[in-house]
Image (spheres, rainbow, N blue to C red):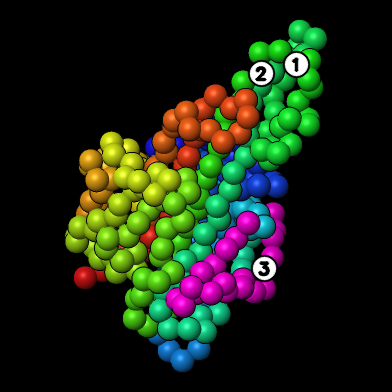
Amino acid sequence: MISRNWAALAVAAAICIPFQAQAHRTWMLPSATVLSGEDPWVTVDAAVSNDLFYFEHVPLRIDGLSITAPDGSAAKAENASTGKYRTTFDLHLTQPGTYKLAMPGKMVVGTYELNGERKRWRGPAEAAAKEIPADAKNVVLTEMHRRLETFVTAGKPTTDALKITGQGLELEPITHPNDLFEGEPAKFRLLLDGKPAAGTEVEVVPGGVRYRSKPDDTKVTSDQDGVITVTWPTPGMYWISAEVEDDKTTVKGAAKRMAVYTATLEVLPQ
């Protein structure tokens, strides 16, 4: 579940760094996740919006985008363009197998008092010590990590690109993320710094929120091994997200760390 603190970063940060917003969700949406043919391409939309997968708020900057090809090499986004409400880019699937599209990020947010006035601050971790005045009082800093992902497969699904990094909150597929079907349970392992994130709540939201009177979101909780099981009620695009908070900070002066994982997954009909 996206917390109020984390979500509050999104709108302003999305202008320069992609983050979540209160009542807004950050996402990448591929035009398809499973493709065939001799020369497959996908187009990916990236945005921060209120209605899921509908462009009505701000574009998502993709400066930190990394694409891992099926053989583990880096692939490139092509034809990238950012408009009023969304960023788009193309991916040429030159290798058979599964690609992972990821946007990891780290920043620091906080508050402090200066001359009796309360101020807010956000930015890269290395800038905090330089930009927050030395005579500031009641400085409260939080280290923030986020990872936004989606997956695309050309032909047969593979797993080499799905390896975790061991940093922050991640989702390790047990069921392949491009082999999801309506009515079938899928299993994933939620990991924090490479270890099971037990007891973590994961929000599961189907797309098309704009056209429903209810969001129809559900929540599942990871077991002692960090495993979640999701049974998809209908085919379509889904947004899943989880958040954890602890005191394992790496930034001087930060009292706590928050880590968020978000992914877009496509569920196909039987």
Disc nearer the start of the sequence (1/3):
3
Q: Nearer the viewer, mark 1 or mark 3?
A: 1
The reply to whether the C-beta atoms of the residues labelled 1 and 3 are less than 8 Å apart is no
Nearer the observer, 241 or 188: 188
Residue holding disc 2: 139
Figure check: 16 above or below 35: above
Numbered badge on residue 136: 1
| Magenta residue check for 232 | no
Q: What is the x, y in percent for residue 9? A: 60, 35
> Under tag 1, what secondary structure?
loop
Nearer the observer, 82 or 103: 103
Residue bounds of the magenta highlight: 64-84
Give the amino acid type for the residue marked by disc 1 in the picture.
Answer: Ala
Circle 2 packing at 10 Å, graded few (<14), some (14-19), many (20+), is many
> Under tag 3, what secondary structure?
strand
Q: What is the x, y in percent for residue 28? A: 52, 58
Q: What is the x, y in percent for residue 80? A: 67, 68
Give the amino acid type for the residue marked by disc 3 in the picture.
Answer: Ala
Q: Residue at x 62, y 53 (%)?
A: 60
